Structures are given as structure tokens and as C-alpha cells.
Image (cartoon, rainbow, N blue to C red):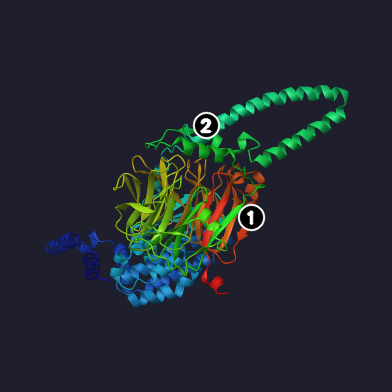
């Protein structure tokens, strides 16, 4: 290779990369060197020129992408078993970026060949992502498709041990696969840790996508979160009253113990028998009344107290007394005392039911439909109708006022009409006197269950609103949308109070914290975020899910959060640290709804696999034992019971204040025709 060829290659490379000023300066330098009869080779490193030439050839030959990825794939699969699962994590981000790079350069046919040849390797873990990328057929699609655009704008975080990382670097330098090296350098952020490789079961937490760098996410998760409960809440008042009662009972018990001691002197055996009988009777009495056997059993009583950041609404005395009565009669649940379950089944919906919601006392059930309607069933009235104990939506010919919802014929439900698009979510106020609905028409509507009328139409989102949730105290509510934002509203204002922006894709679900100072949002970008309602800032980013988040639930003490995704995985998070406490593996399809029991000892999950599962939360929050760490079973929630339905996907779950579990779902078409 002579000097002129080297100069031409360098000039061609600079021109192709768009470095016009550099290329002009280089040409000017060449002309000056020729004028001075000096050798241009002194200013150009021949090895570097060869590297540029090789890089240029790679870019001009799309087959090099196929060859480079094939070699990397073969090397990873042939690695030692101890490190193989870590090295295989690198393949998926390299695969999708090789495909998108080929499309961006206009090599559509070669991109399709590459995609179809290797897609089977990743279908088990990333099927939904591959189905989206399959629609990319031109360079313009990369910008127009939101998912592809977010991939090209973000980095993939991969946790890997030091030795695996060094082996990967050694392979890349040895093979000189410039294309693969460029993709890994530009698209992957390695988090290298010392010691042995992580276990295969932890893969879900080790490959994640985030719009910001991991350092930024770590900085966000260092912010302080006040996860405690509100001061002077109804639960706290009841606990104080119960504490005074228990003190008086304790004093009485000491007196009785003194009597027993005297009896022991007369007859030791008789005293022991008497004491055991009393203990059994006391335990049975406590279990029958549903009151907790120990104050420590309720995790909410141990939670710290915080001040509200929002102006809380005033609760009427009548409502307060009703709630306190429910709390006094609450049944204490545990791993050995599971809840009673009441399941509401919608039939004859013709696949039109999009969502359902149950009031706090289970008296009202709402359903949102694809025909833009919202229907509310009153269980008391439904029970009075002989022979009609299910929620039907067929052959109903009665008429109604489209504005007020008043019926003029025999109908088992109240019809609310006003939306101009499918209703995607509904939620009852804590008292049950209001119900909110969100729709594909970009609006949220407030309805009165007392007046059977639409009161307010809230407009603010620019795209379909996927979810809406009342706050635990009422008055305030939160919504989330396809526009990638969540918003906080109050019933008396038609404009949102706060807008939370930061997710890279649709915000699919939203949930309030127990103290109303935070909201959590789950997104199609596979992350969950926690937001401060006062300033609208993101204070936590939870990374670990492999698919879109469909459901969220907050523990009653405010410390933990559960999230369910499209793959059927549920993850339990610690809000104070931002880390995953444990994954819950058991469902085989989408987890559409989650609910904690009122004392926080149980978690219920409802899925499209037509089951309700009950999980033991208490055992997961205890520090793992040494033998559990060695066996790899630490921090795994125990599934207590699976409650299957005939063929009814579970749309919503709700624990009443007395700890009765309500569930709702629509009988699927296959079952109704069977």
C-alpha cells in the first residue's frame, strides 16, 4: 500500500463520516507536504490507516454483521458453564442493535434475513419486544416507532462478574470484530462486580433498559423517602384505643396469674391444666372475634408516622364511625388463617369488558366496556332479584337517559354513558359515593353513585388514559396515559395539579402510597417509578421486570410495593432502598391485579391464567438465614394457595376493611360456549 492510497482511504473515511472541516484540513496539509517535497507518511500511522480501511470495508459489507454476531454467539454458547449464562446476556442487545443498524443503513433484506435467523434464541425472554421490532421495515420506522426509538436512545445495563467481563474483552480484541465492538461500546453499560458469577435465577434483575445512565438511577434512589403512615389516622386512633384496652386486660391477667400461683401451691398439676385451658380458651376467643392475638402481628402499627403533603379532606362523623366499626371487626389473616373470597363473574360480555372495580365494602361493582359505557351493579339490589345472582350484560332491552343514567325498565345495573371511546379503568372512592372512569377518548369522568349522574369531565391527557385511581383518603386521584405521563388531580379542579414525566413508553398503571405523599407508576418501558406528589419529582426507579408492568399494590405499612407484569412475574420492592426483596414466580400469564391484606401479611394476585394466588408476605421480609443463602432459596415468597376459576380471567381484587377478599372477572368465550 503506497502513500497515496493511504491518504485516499483516510480522506474517504472522513468524508463518509461527515467530518468536512477535518477532511479539508487534511487535504490542505497534503498539498503543503507535496509542495515542500516531504513525505506524507510521517503524519499518518499505517496501522491506523489499515484499521480505518477495515472499518470502512465492514460498513460497506452488511454480511459482516451476520458474521460478527454468529462468531460472538458461538463463542458465548461454547463458554464454560460457570460463566455461560452471564455471557449470553450480551447477545440480545447486540442482536437487536445489529438488526436496527442494518435497517438504518438501508439494508432491509439483509436485516430481515439476520432477524429471522437468530430470533428463536430470544423468543422465550423477549417475545413481545421481537414482535414489535418485526414491524420495522424501513429507516423511517426506527424514528416513528416509539419502542425502536427508545432502544436507540437508551443503553442496556448488564451486571457481570469481573472474570466474565475480562473474557469478553479478550475475545473482542482477539477477533477484531469492529462492528460488534462498536455496538457493545455504544449500547451496553456494564456493571462489573468482583467475585463469582450471579445465579441464573437472578437474570431478570441483571439485564435492564433505562433512559438515564445507571449512575443517575442510583443517585435518584438515594433520595429520602418517607414511607411511614399518616399521623392521627383512623387506624392509629383504633390502635391507641386497643393499646389502652390491652393494658387493662394485662392488669387483670396479672391478678389472675396471682390466683393461679396460689392454686399451684395446693396442686401443681391442677394449676398447669387450668392455665393451659385458659390459654386455649383465650386463643379461641381471639380467633373467633377476628381481633389480633398480638399487637406486633400488625406491621402497620410499627410503621413510622409522617405528615401529609396534601390538604386532606374532612371525613364526616358518620363515615368515620362506620370505618372504625369495620376496623374493630377486622379478621386477622396469616399464613394459617386465609381469607374468605367472594368472586363476581361477568357473563355474556361478548369480550366487551375492559376493566372492573369493586368498592371497599364490596357493595358496588363497576365494569368498563368497549362500547364506551360504564355499568355499576348494586349487590344488595341484585340479591333481591330472584334467580339472578350473576352480572349479566345480555338481552337487556330497557332504556335509559344517556346523561343521567336513570333506567326506565327492569335492569340489574345502572348505566353511565358519556365517554366516546372504550373505558379502560374505573375506581370507587373510599366511601363508594363516587366512581371515576378513564377512556380512550383521553378524558376522565367523575360519576355520582347517589345521583346516577356525570358530574365532571377532566381533560388534560393527549392520548388514551389507561388507568385512574382514587387516593386512600378520596378527593385526589391519579391517572396515567399513552402520552407517557402520570397526572394528579383533585375532584374540585378540572386541570391537573401535577404532571409526572420521565417514562420512556406508555404508563400503564398507577397506585397511591398509603400516606398519599407518593404515587407509583408502571410502564411499558419495564420500569416502575415512585413520584413525590408535592414537587412531581421521581424519587425511585425500580428496574428488574422483563415486560410491561400491568399492576401495582402498596403494603398497608407503606414500606413495600408489589408489581406484576405481562409475563406473569410479580416482584416485591423495598421502597426505602429501591431494591427487589423477592420475585414471585407462579402465574403463567399476565398479572392484571394485586392486593395486600389490611394487616399486610398476605398478598393476593389475579391473572389472565384464570387463578387467584395468595402469597405469604411476612416470611419474605425477615432476614434470610445462612442455610437459605447457600441453597439459593433466600427471599422467595411462599405461595400459600392457588384458587382456580372455571375459565374466568381475574380483572380486579379488593380486600375489604374487614379483610374479606373480593374478586371480579369475565367468563371467557371458551367457557361460555363449552
Q: As rendered, which of 59 and 191 lies closer to the eye?
A: 191
Front label number (2 vs 1): 2
Q: Residues within 10 Å of mark 2 (few under 14, many from 20)?
A: few
Regarding residue 531, the answer to whether it shows in the image is yes
Residue 514 x %, y % = 47, 42
Q: Residue furthest left?
A: 35
Which residue shows up at 32% across the image and 75% down it? 107
Q: Using the image, determine if residue 1 lies above or below residue 436.
A: below
566 vs 611, left or right, is left
Between the residue at mark 2 and the residue at mark 1, the CA separation in whole angstroms equals 33 Å
Q: Is residue 463 above or below residue 213?
A: below
Residue receiving disc 1: 641
For the residues bearing labels 2 and 1, Cβ distance under 8 angstroms: no
Q: Is residue 175 visible?
A: no
Label number found at residue 237: 2
Specify the quadrant of the image occupied by residue 238.
Answer: top right
Of the numbered discs 2 and 1, the one sitting upstream in the chain is 2
Spot occupied by residue 596 in the image (x, y as percentages of width and height): 54, 48
Helix, strand or loop at mark 1 = strand
**191 vs 138: above or below:** above
The C terminus - image quarter:
bottom right
In terms of secondary structure, where does tag 2 sit?
A: helix
Q: Is residue 269 above or below residue 561?
A: above
**Of the pair 126 and 456, the residue shown nearer to us:** 456
User: Where residue 385 appears, x then y in whole percent?
Assistant: 54, 60
Q: Quadrant of the N terminus?
A: bottom left
Residue 575 pos. (x, y %): 48, 43
User: Image check: 471 left or right of 330?
Assistant: left
Residue 303 placement, left or right of 254: left
Amino acid at each position: 500500500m503506497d502513500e497515496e492510497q493511504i491518504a485516499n482511504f483516510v480522506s474517504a473515511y472522513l468524508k463518509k463520516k461527515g467530518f468536512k472541516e477535518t477532511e479539508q484540513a487534511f487535504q490542505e496539509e497534503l498539498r503543503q507536504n507535496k509542495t515542500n517535497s516531504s513525505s506524507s507518511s510521517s503524519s499518518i500511522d499505517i496501522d491506523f490507516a489499515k484499521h480505518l480501511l477495515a472499518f470502512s470495508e465492514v460498513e460497506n459489507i452488511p454480511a459482516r454483521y451476520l458474521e460478527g454476531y454468529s462468531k460472538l454467539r458461538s463463542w458465548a454458547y461454547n463458554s464454560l458453564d460457570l460463566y455461560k449464562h452471564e455471557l449470553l446476556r450480551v447477545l440480545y442487545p447486540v442482536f437487536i442493535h445489529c438488526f436496527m443498524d442494518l435497517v438504518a443503513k438501508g439494508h432491509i433484506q439483509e436485516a430481515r434475513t439476520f432477524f429471522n435467523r437468530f430470533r428463536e434464541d430470544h423468543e422465550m425472554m423477549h417475545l413481545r419486544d421481537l414482535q414489535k421490532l418485526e414491524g420495522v421495515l424501513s429507516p423511517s420506522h426506527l424514528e416513528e416507532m416509539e419502542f425502536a426509538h427508545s432502544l436507540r436512545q437508551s443503553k442496556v445495563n448488564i451486571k457481570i462478574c469481573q472474570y466474565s467481563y475480562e473474557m469478553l474483552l479478550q475475545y473482542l480484541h482477539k477477533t477484531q470484530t469492529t462492528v460488534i465492538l462498536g455496538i457493545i461500546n455504544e449500547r451496553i453499560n456494564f456493571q462489573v462486580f468482583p467475585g463469582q458469577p450471579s445465579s441464573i435465577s437472578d437474570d431478570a434483575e441483571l439485564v435492564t433498559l433505562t433512559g438515564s445512565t445507571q449512575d443517575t438511577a442510583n443517585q435518584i434512589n438515594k433520595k429520602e423517602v418517607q414511607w411511614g403512615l399518616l399521623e392521627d389516622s383512623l387506624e392509629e386512633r383504633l390502635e391507641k384505643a386497643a393499646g389502652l384496652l390491652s393494658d387493662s386486660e394485662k392488669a387483670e391477667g396479672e391478678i389472675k396469674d396471682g390466683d393461679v400461683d396460689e392454686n399451684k401451691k395446693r396442686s401443681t398439676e391442677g394449676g398447669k391444666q387450668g392455665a393451659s385451658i385458659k390459654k386455649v380458651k383465650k386463643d379461641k376467643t381471639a380467633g373467633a372475634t377476628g381481633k389480633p392475638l398480638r399487637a406486633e402481628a400488625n406491621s402497620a402499627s410499627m410503621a413510622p408516622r409522617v405528615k401529609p403533603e396534601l390538604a386532606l379532606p374532612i371525613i364526616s362523623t358518620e363515615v368515620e364511625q362506620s370505618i372504625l366499626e369495620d376496623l374493630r371487626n377486622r379478621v386477622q389473616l396469616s399464613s394459617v388463617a386465609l381469607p374468605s373470597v367472594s368472586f363476581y363473574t361477568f357473563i355474556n360480555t361478548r369480550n366487551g369488558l375492559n376493566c372492573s372495580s369493586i368498592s371497599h365494602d364490596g357493595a358496588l361493582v363497576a365494569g368498563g366496556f368497549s362500547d364506551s359505557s360504564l355499568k355499576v351493579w348494586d349487590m344488595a339490589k341484585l340479591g333481591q332479584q330472584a334467580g339472578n345472582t350473576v352480572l349479566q350484560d345480555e338481552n337487556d332491552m330497557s332504556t335509559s337517559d344517556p346523561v343521567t343514567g336513570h333506567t326506565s325498565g327492569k335492569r340489574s345495573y345502572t348505566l353511565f354513558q358519556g365517554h366516546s371511546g372504550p373505558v379502560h379503568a374505573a375506581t370507587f372512592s373510599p366511601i363508594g359515593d363516587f366512581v371515576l372512569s378513564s377512556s380512550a377518548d383521553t378524558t376522565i369522568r367523575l360519576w355520582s353513585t347517589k345521583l346516577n349522574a356525570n358530574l365532571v369531565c377532566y381533560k388534560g391527557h393527549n392520548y388514551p388514559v389507561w388507568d385512574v385511581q382514587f387516593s386512600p383518603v378520596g378527593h385526589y386521584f391519579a391517572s396515567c396515559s399513552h402520552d407517557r405521563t402520570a397526572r394528579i388531580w383533585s375532584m374540585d379542579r378540572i386541570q391537573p395539579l401535577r404532571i409526572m414525566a420521565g417514562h420512556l413508553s406508555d404508563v400503564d398503571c398507577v397506585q397511591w402510597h398509603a400516606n398519599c405523599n407518593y404515587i407509583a407508576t408502571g410502564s411499558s418501558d419495564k420500569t416502575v417509578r415512585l413520584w413525590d406528589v408535592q414537587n412531581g419529582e421521581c424519587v425511585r426507579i425500580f428496574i428488574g421486570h422483563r415486560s410491561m408492568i400491568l399492576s401495582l399494590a402498596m403494603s398497608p405499612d407503606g414500606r413495600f410495593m408489589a408489581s406484576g407484569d405481562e409475563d406473569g412475574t410479580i416482584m416485591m420492592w423495598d421502597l426505602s432502598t429501591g431494591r427487589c426483596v423477592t420475585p414471585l414466580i407462579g402465574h403463567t400469564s399476565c398479572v392484571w391485579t394485586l392486593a395486600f391484606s389490611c394487616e399486610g401479611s398476605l398478598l393476593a394476585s389475579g391473572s389472565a391464567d384464570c387463578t387467584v394466588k395468595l402469597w405469604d408476605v411476612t416470611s419474605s421480609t425477615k432476614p434470610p438465614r445462612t442455610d437459605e443463602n447457600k441453597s439459593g432459596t433466600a427471599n422467595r415468597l411462599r405461595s400459600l394457595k392457588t384458587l382456580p376459576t372455571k375459565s374466568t380471567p381475574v380483572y380486579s381484587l379488593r380486600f375489604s376493611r374487614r379483610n374479606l377478599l373480593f374478586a371480579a372477572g369475565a367468563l371467557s368465550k371458551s367457557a361460555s360456549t363449552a
